[in-house]
Amino acid sequence: MNKNIIQIKGVKKSYKDVEVLKGVDFEVEQGGIFALLGSNGAGKTTMIKIMATLLKADAGSIVINGFDIEKNHGGIRGSISLTGQFAAIDEILTGRENIQMIAKLRHLENPNAVAEELINRFGMSEAADRRVGTYSGGMKRRIDIAMSLVGNPKIIFLDEPTTGLDPEARLEVWKIVKELSSAGTTVFLTTQHLEEAEQLANKIAILHGGKIIALDTLERLKKLFPPAKIEYVEKQPTLEEIFLTIIGKKGGEINGIYK
Amino acid sequence: MESTNKYFFKDMSVMFGRSMRHIFRSMDTIITVSITPIAFMLLFVYVFGGAIETGTENYIDYLLPGIMLMTIGSGIAYVAYRLFMDKQRGILERFHSMPIARSTVLWGHVLTSLISNGISIVVIILVALLMGFRSSAGILEWLAVFGILGVFTLALTWVAVIAGLAAKTPDGAGAFAYPIIFLPFVSSAFVPTDTMPSAVRVFAEKQPVTPIVEAIRNLLSNQPVGSEIWTALAWCIVIIVVAYIFAMRIYKKL
């Protein structure tokens, strides 16, 4: 049973005179990774904020996990979790306290145990009792995502989860996202990096000029556009590959990060 | 629409616990808040005090209520600052996308403001005691003093909430407090108003700081408190109601 957990129809939103979303339609299947691709200022963040009940759309209908946004904010908020573009963490608290705080706000039975479990799962036991202010960008992102997983929400919104991260941290985030999806969580992410969408998503929507101009699986999108040509090119290692080789951690085998 | 009200107090206590941790992990804010008023207290008592005729034996007894208000004025600048940082860092957005009662976020900051200003006031009183402040007030009078200060703090805190939510920069968030810190100067807090030019005197006697200062001064010296205490409280309550309405209006639009 693959019912669509997110149903968006005709969503419009303007800021003053600027119409950012001009009738956005799309549906997201349960359990997959859905990427909303678009350039800077295309309205990706606006779309995510509308779905996360932070902004009100001017028109259109939004149903998430069976809850209509017009009637039931609470139901939607209970089903989703938002990881914004900038790590929204309390820097004065420790990583553990941040997770505990979210667990308490989600009214879970045992916030301390929830925090302990997530800290272990994210391989952060050493850093957990230090203040978040001392963390690196990648660690902040990890804690940020860990906070979003508290209470096992059905849908996770990740707004440009890897923007501003170094290549190593970006691979970590990708790995986390893949694991989440294989555990059954629906992941909705925005990105401006084509490679990211290509790596992660099983459905890709392209937001351009205020509308979704393409929505399909990567394979079918590839078929739609210029046919594959065969060229012979000497493949030089990218700087990213060089960087990762030198520091001894090649994609996917990041040791000690995750289980 | 909100099915979250049954958790109101629970959520609020989480918010409160969070911002109290901020206070206790940055005790320097308490010190920063108290330093300016303490400096003024030293300056006025040991430099100007001898030349000021107040009709009281001990100038510091006259001065302390105004210093207390100044302390609260500088303390609430941090409320605006902390709220602004929450807004800027995206923590407010995280909270708002969760199934919690929205206003508890603000109430957490407001309660914390009451407690942290209370701590600063105690610090100020201890320093004043070292400097020779003595009071004949009993328990009830002290409770009344803290009650008035609490209501005053609450009023200014809601003003600070507006500043924190509306600010565009961290400096802007705290800047609104400067006029409040200096309001006691144009009141009867440091010198009696009789010698001021008439226009200034009218302002000094009518503005909210004067009745609050005088009510506290009378309580601390065990004098009968006249109607000024009600004027003082009425001022505070008007400010609370107006500032609360504005703050909530801005907050809903975030």
Image (spheres, coloured by chain):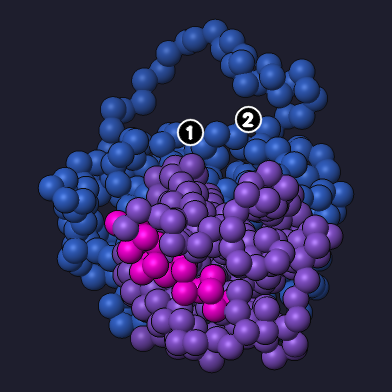
Instruction: Describe residue A144's horizontal placement relative to residue B126 as left or right.
Output: left
Q: Is residue B19 placed above or below B172 in the rendered structure?
A: below
Q: Give the range drawn in magenta.
A: B199-216
Q: Which residue in the rendered view is the most extreme toward the top?
A: A234
Q: In this view, does B19 lie above or below A237?
A: below
Residue A232's place in the image compared with A68, above or below, is above
Residue labelled with disc 2? A167
Give the residue drawn at x 58%, y 88%.
B224
Instruction: Locate the N terminus of chain A by quadrant.
Output: bottom left
- Above/below status of B30 relative to B101: above
For image coordinates 20% across by 41% down, the residue present is A209
Q: In this view, does B233 lie to the left or right of B109?
A: left
User: Which x, y percent locates residue B118?
Assistant: 68, 70
Q: Residue at x 77, y 29 (%)?
A: A249
Residue B227 spot, x, y in % from top left: 45, 87
Residue B183 screen position, x and y as percent: 46, 56
Total labels drawn: 2
Find out whether residue B203 is within the magenta segment. yes
Q: Estimate the spatial distance between the alpha carbons at disc 2 and disc 1, rounded to whole Å.
A: 12 Å
Q: Which chain is purple?
A: B
Q: Which chain carries label 1?
A: A
Q: Output the chain of dot 2.
A: A
Circle 1: element type: helix
Report the front residue among B155 and B5. B155
Q: Residue B158 appears in which quarter of the rendering?
A: bottom left
* Number of the label disc, if any, that sits on residue A195: 1
Question: Front-most of B12 and B27?
Answer: B27
User: Where residue A13 is drawn, which disc sits there?
Assistant: none
Chain corresponding to blue in the figure: A
